[in-house]
Image (cartoon, helix red, strand yellow):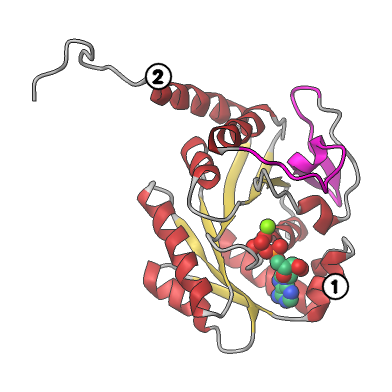
Amino acid sequence: MAESAAEPAGFMHPSILRVIEQKKRVKERLKDIKHRIGVYSAKGGVGKTTTAVNLAYALKSLGYNVGLLDADIDCPNISLFMGIDSKSDGTYPLKPVEKDGIKIMSTAMLMDDERKPIIWRGPMIGKMVSEFLENTEWGSLDYLVLDMPPNTSDAPLSIIQLLDLDGFLLVTTPQHISAVNTVRSGRMAKRLGASLIGVVENMSKGNPEGGRYVANELGCEFLGSIKESDEMWRLSDKGIIPFISDQGIREEYISIARKIIG
Ligand SMILES: Nc1ncnc2c1ncn2[C@@H]1O[C@H](COP(=O)(O)OP(=O)(O)O)[C@@H](O)[C@H]1O
Ligand SMILES: [Mg+2]
């Protein structure tokens, strides 16, 4: 096809150039982080935040330097799950808040009242994601765990485009509907060139049908399951980390973390 006069060879749309520039800045900012793991499913409520928080503790307990980024920009939950009231002072570069030796950053730390809804259209979400990735000073880390937003649209798309992740840890519940939606997220990540670390079945009731379905469909590893228990949500509701207060849960997450490291 003949080249258009307005678009000479090498022409790139300004929006693509912008992404390339942002990507360079994010890369520079995150250059001292050895591994980045996105905890992801297109389905809400399956336990992405639960998995991200407890996995961060498991990695920390194995001796690594860990950061936790609440990448669920418009519905940030990490502070609630971790009982964190501290706010960032809002000056750039943004400094993560530290708890139990883990560095944490969330949009909730930039808001005066967490109960206020954040109502943004796609471009604003994308802008906030890049602001966050470009401007948070993590220092050197072995692992940065990202608590991903659900769905397969703007927010996860921006994150996958801007950040070279080592891969995604997928989360599903046992139900087929959850598993199918988790497969969707895995396919999206793969299509964008990201790799899949494996899948965890959360709220498991025994035989991990959902987790195995996702692993088979995507050709990735089934890493383990976390049982459904009232204790899990009751502790999280109080801002207590299940990993710290329950030995059985701790062992499950450590086993999953070891497989991820491996
Ligand atoms: N294994 C589990 N057993 C019981 N409740 C759980 C378990 N995992 C997570 N929950 C609870 O389910 C709810 C949704 O979990 P959450 O981690 O917020 O999911 P997501 O981040 O995918 O939306 C929370 O109240 C959480 O405490
Ligand atoms: Mg969440």
* Residue at which label 2 appears: 14
Q: Which mark is residue 87?
A: none
Q: State whether the magenta stretch is mostly helix, strand or loop.
A: loop
Residue at 75% x, 55% y is 60
* Residue at which label 1 appears: 234
Q: Quadrant of the C terminus?
A: bottom right
**Distance between mark 1 and mark 2 Cα atoms:** 48 Å
What's the residue type where badge 1 is placed? Answer: Arg
Q: Is residue 231 left or right of residue 66?
A: right
In the foreground, 32 or 214:
214
Label 1, secondary structure: give it.
Answer: helix
As drawn, 145 above or below 93? below
How far across and down, in percent of the image, does residue 186 sit?
Answer: 44, 60
Label 2, secondary structure: give it.
Answer: helix
Count of marks placed on residues: 2
Q: Is residue 253 left or right of residue 14?
A: right
Report whether residue 51 is seen.
no
Q: Is residue 86 left or right of residue 125?
A: right
- Residue reaching furthest to the top: 5
Q: Quadrant of ligand 2?
A: bottom right
Q: Quadrant of the N terminus?
A: top left
